[in-house]
Amino acid sequence: MLSKNKRVSKKLFTEILEKGLVLYGDFFIFKYVHSKNPHFSVVVSKKILKGAVARNKLKRKGYNAIREIKTEDISGIFFYKKSGINKNFKEIKEDIYSILLKKK
């Protein structure tokens, strides 16, 4: 998990949704804004998975993948796509990494 001070706040969340740029990966949609301090969030919709336990498990995989990748100049939100449900940690990490490379 990401520490709480590295996750997106409510205020920043709405700012990213309103003003953010969008990138698409195989398993995620990534909305982001440029910022000095990196903050990230992972969202799994109820439309994707009904059970809270399964959604939380996917979020933990996403947060752990983000934690291992170093970024400095953006804050963003990763939205899971339906195609990312049954993927393992390595595949999720590779997709997040490829999305973050696209933004440069």
Image (tube, rainbow, N blue to C red):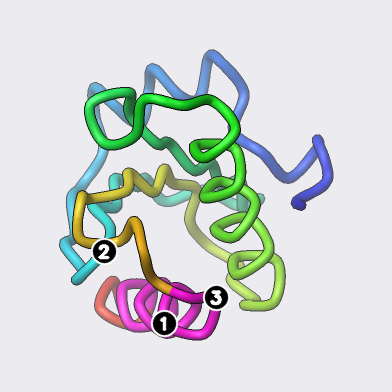
* Residue 47 sits in quarter: top left
Amino acid type shown at disc 3: Phe
> Toward the viewer: 61 or 76?
61
Give the structural element (helix, strand or loop) at label 1.
Answer: helix
Evaluate if marks 3 and 1 touch, with contact meaning CB atoms under 8 Å apart: yes
Q: CA distance from mark 1 to mark 2?
A: 9 Å
Q: CA distance from mark 3 to mark 1?
A: 6 Å
Mark 1 or mark 2, which has the lower sequence index? 2
Q: Which residue is mark 2?
A: 27
State whether residue 54 is above or below residue 1. Answer: above
The magenta region covers 88-100
- Secondary structure mostly seen in magenta is helix
Q: Is 49 a magenta residue? A: no
Quadrant occupied by the C terminus: bottom left
State whether residue 66 is above or below residue 69. Answer: above
Residue located 67% across and 39% down the image: 7
Mark 3 or mark 2, which has the lower sequence index? 2
Amino acid type shown at disc 1: Glu
Q: CA distance from mark 3 to mark 2?
A: 12 Å
Q: Which residue is mark 3?
A: 89
Instruction: Answer left or right for 53 relative to 50.
Output: right
Give the structural element (helix, strand or loop) at label 3.
Answer: helix
Q: Position of residue 97 (x, y in %)?
A: 43, 80
Alpha-carbon neighbours of circle 1 within 10 Å: few (<14), some, or many (≥20)?
A: some
Which label number is shown at residue 91?
A: 1
Alpha-carbon neighbours of circle 2 within 10 Å: few (<14), some, or many (≥20)?
A: many
Q: Position of residue 62 (x, y in %)?
A: 54, 58
> Toward the viewer: 97 or 14?
97
Amino acid type shown at disc 2: Phe
Q: Is 98 a magenta residue? A: yes
